[in-house]
Amino acid sequence: MSKDKTPDAEPKKGGKMKKLLMIGIGAIVLVGAGAGAGIYFGALSAHEAKPEDHYPKLVERSNEAEAPAAEGEGEEAPLKVGTVSVPNDRFKVDPRKYEVTYFAIPDPFTTNLADGSGFLQVGISLSTFYDGKVIGNIKRQQVPIRSVVLMVLAEQDPAMLATSPGKQRLQRQLTAAINDVLRDKEGFGGIDNVYFTSLVIQ
């Protein structure tokens, strides 16, 4: 009888070991699957596109001297590539840390003055601390930009434009108007200032 009990006891022992082994393997598989899923979904959320990822980026100043643009060949200098993302285009930019780019509007603007006493002709250049995306936006939106600039110029008082504060006020008005157009059409302004390349009142 003792011989009969021994064979029965061994299969029960082996069955328990198999069950424990299967439970252990199952637990390891579940933990591994959970960790894998966590890493996968964590990576997805880390790379999820944020609105600011599509905005122009600030161009950090470099210590190296820039190579001069090719002259006389009709080629434009390559557009700068920014590396610093910002949450919106009203971000306060430190001009000591970021590089400025100037873009001259090709043709001057000519309009009658508000009091009808003469006309005003202005050439302007725009500055930005952001990358080439802003320049691309300006080029795409030249028609509405020209329109809004002409409207702002037509409202000017010639007596005010004869003074330095009057010209500075016009610079601020043009900067705000151009940024409004870019925000409306492209979702991002990015113009830091408007500079006069010519200004004639007659």
Image (spheres, rainbow, N blue to C red):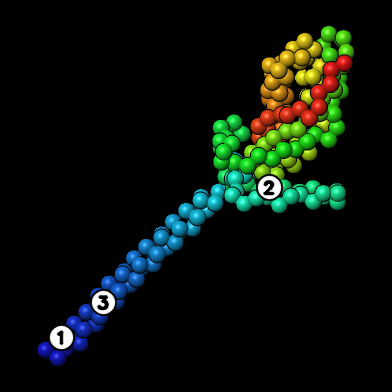
Determine crowd level at label 1: few under 14, some 14-19, many 20+ residues with C-alpha closer than 10 A: few
Q: Label 2 is placed on what type of residue?
A: Lys
Q: Nearer the viewer, mark 3 or mark 2?
A: 2
Q: Answer above or below: position of 123 versus 7.
A: above
Q: Which residue is labeled 3 in the image? A: 17
Q: Say left or right for 86 vs 173.
A: left
Outermost residue, left direction?
Answer: 2
The residue under the point 56% across, 32% down is: 92
Q: Which residue is labeled 2 in the image? A: 80
Q: Answer above or below: position of 160 versus 1.
A: above
Q: Label 3 is placed on what type of residue?
A: Met
Q: Label 1 is placed on what type of residue?
A: Lys
Q: Say left or right for 23 vs 13.
A: right
Q: Secondary structure at mark 3?
A: helix
* Quadrant occupied by the N terminus: bottom left
Q: Which residue is labeled 1 in the image? A: 5
Give the camera-side residue of 55 and 57: 57
Question: Residue 96 location, x and y as percent?
Answer: 57, 38
Question: Residue 86 location, x and y as percent?
Answer: 57, 39
- State the separation of the CA atoms marked 1 and 2: 86 Å
The residue under the point 84% across, 17% down is: 201
Give the camera-side residue of 10 and 190: 190
- State the separation of the CA atoms marked 3 and 1: 19 Å
Q: Say left or right for 138 vs 7.
A: right
The residue under the point 73% across, 33% down is: 126
Q: Earlier in the sequence, mark 3 or mark 2?
A: 3
Question: Residue 192 location, x and y as percent?
Answer: 65, 32
Give the camera-side residue of 180 and 14: 180
Q: Earlier in the sequence, mark 1 or mark 2?
A: 1
